Amino acid sequence: MRGLSVDILIQTAATALFGDFVDLDDMAEEAMLQLNMLSVAQLCRYYVRDMLDSGKGHVLLVSGMSAFQPTPSLSSFAASKAFVQSLGESMAYELKGQGITVTVLATGGLPGEVLRELGSTERRARLPPQGVVRMALQGMEKGLSVVIPGKVDRAGLLANRLVPRRLVPPMIHRLLKSSVTRH
């Protein structure tokens, strides 16, 4: 592509649809899944092939905490982030020892601007974006396959793994409902 050599591929583009799965618009959901999953996979395949030829490179993908749990009212979005998480961790293993690292940044919660678009007035205590970026890049440089910035998010993931799976959807649903006012 234009004769450029890409040593670092950072994929952050994503969109979310809020609402019950059966109520989502088919075309909007298809566009979201195209952006969140297929474009990620296609761009990785394209650029990682070039990285393999040069024997070096870094890939940074962004999933989210929803990749690790069922997320009612964001079901398709969460599933797309689970795809990115699995793809990234799998690629990291497949490319081990070939000079290419793959790191997946699992950010916590929804960004404030997305919450506001969904009607939320809640402000969450989160790491500033600069801190998240710094941790992601440091993890990528160290060759970590997963980076979860923030003690709260890491503790939440651990708690999520300890809670029986059947209890997670109602808990997540209550949290989302309390932070997002549906129009």
Image: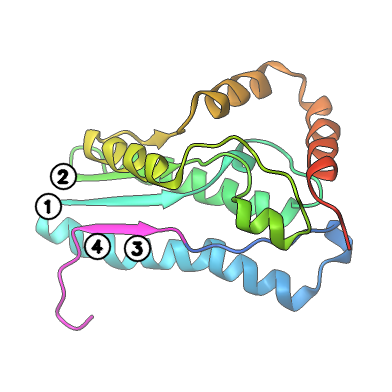
Report, in whole angstroms, how far the alpha carbon at label 1 lies from the one at label 3: 15 Å
* Helix, strand or loop for disc 2: loop
Residue 17 vertical placement versus 61 (above, below):
below
* Helix, strand or loop for disc 1: loop
Please report contact status of discs 3 and 4: CB closer than 8 Å, yes or no.
Answer: yes
Viewer-nearest residue: 47 or 94: 47
User: What is the x, y in percent for residue 139?
Assistant: 31, 35
Q: Residues within 10 Å of mark 2 (few under 14, many from 20)?
A: some
Q: Determine the residue positioned at 68% across, 36% down.
A: 69
Numbered badge on residue 45: 3
Pointer 1 or 4: first along the chain: 4
| Among the 4 quarters of the image, the one containing residue 43 | bottom left
The furthest residue to the top: 162
Label 4 sits on what residue type?
Arg
Label 2 sits on what residue type?
Gly
Report, in whole angstroms, how far the alpha carbon at label 1 lies from the one at label 4: 10 Å
Magenta region: 1-12
Report, in whole angstroms, how far the alpha carbon at label 2 lies from the one at label 3: 16 Å
Q: Which residue is mark 2?
A: 99
Report, in whole angstroms, how far the alpha carbon at label 3 lies from the one at label 4: 6 Å
Numbered badge on residue 55: 1
Label 3 sits on what residue type?
Arg
Q: Which residue is mark 4?
A: 49
Quadrant including the C terminus:
bottom right
User: What is the x, y in percent for residue 76?
Assistant: 71, 56
Viewer-nearest residue: 40 or 111: 111
Pointer 2 or 3: first along the chain: 3
Report, in whole angstroms, how far the alpha carbon at label 1 lies from the one at label 2: 5 Å
Pointer 4 or 2: first along the chain: 4
Q: Determine the residue positioned at 23% across, 80% down.
A: 1
Left or right position of 130 against 172: left
Q: Please tell me whether the stretch drawn in magenta is mainly helix, strand or loop.
A: loop
